[in-house]
Image (cartoon, rainbow, N blue to C red):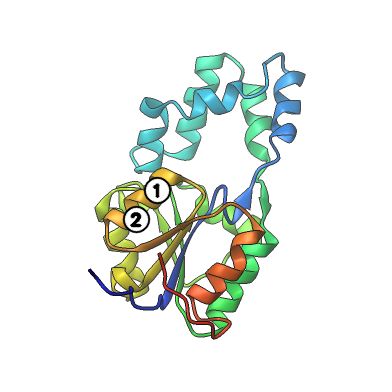
Amino acid sequence: MPGPRPRATALLVDLDGTLRHWDHAVQATAERRHGLAPGTILRTAMEWPRVQPAITGQVTHAEWMAGVAAALDAPDAVREWEEYLGEVDADVLGLVKAARQAGLPVGIATNATDRLDADLAALGLAGAVDAVLNSSVLGVPKPSPEYFARACRALRTPAEKVLFVDDSDRFVRGARAAGLSAYRWTGPADLPYLRAALGLDHQPVAVR
């Protein structure tokens, strides 16, 4: 039976749904103002044939949004909808800061467009981590093995010593398959485990 994994010495954290959250009521208000049902723009934007080129760098964010606007015949609604950039999760940001203060490299791992740098700056997250792994720059999205391999190289840490935190079961499974430790984020109650897993509280724990 294999022994316990080595303690994580680097942190890789998801952006949307983990470090950044969305109040969908804000976007739903914009949709209703333009005669669209709540969730219509998001569903249209995230249709895989439409979003995949945007998150792998084949088209720009502006081109992606133009396609959504054309599909819905609602350019003003899409423009207003995308102006909302979400909110930073203070608890996750605190974990990021604590890890960096302890000397651990930290990266953001996200499927994003070429607007990511501007979003991070607007959210006050520019410079908050040591590496930003943007799928549109890498040309491959989570949860591909190549994505995680490149993330580990960016953090200069072997996969088995990288702890990945994401709110998506699918991405967590992909990270584990690539050799990383991975934990599904569900909320602030997860923080004690994650802090211990990174050795931030000097508590022995087996990373799962």
Q: Amino acid at mark 1?
A: Phe
Where residue 57 appears, as percent x and y from the top left, is 35, 43
Query: Answer yes or no: do the residues labelled 2 and 1 have beta carbons within 8 Å?
Result: yes
| In the image, residue 183 above or below residue 131 | above
Instruction: Determine the residue positioned at 52% across, 30% down.
Output: 65
Q: Is residue 36 left or right of residue 197?
A: right
* Residue 200 figure quarter: bottom right
- How far apart marks 2 and 1 lie (CA) works out to 6 Å
Where residue 90 appears, as percent x and y from the top left, is 69, 62
How many neighbours does mark 2 have within 10 angstroms: few (below 14), some (14-19), or many (20 or more)?
many
**Labels in figure, total:** 2
Q: Amino acid at mark 2?
A: Ala
Where residue 7 appears, as percent x and y from the top left, is 39, 78
**Any part of residue 125 in sight:** no
- Residue at mark 1: 171
Q: Quadrant of the N terminus?
A: bottom left
| In the image, residue 69 above or below residue 140 | above
Classify mark 1: helix, strand or loop.
helix
- The mark found on residue 175 in the picture is 2
Instruction: Determine the residue positioned at 71% across, 40% down.
Output: 23
Instruction: Determine the residue positioned at 40% across, 42% down.
Output: 55
Q: Is residue 109 left or right of residue 36?
A: left
Instruction: Determine the residue positioned at 56% across, 73% down.
Output: 195
Camera-side residue: 199 or 96?
A: 199
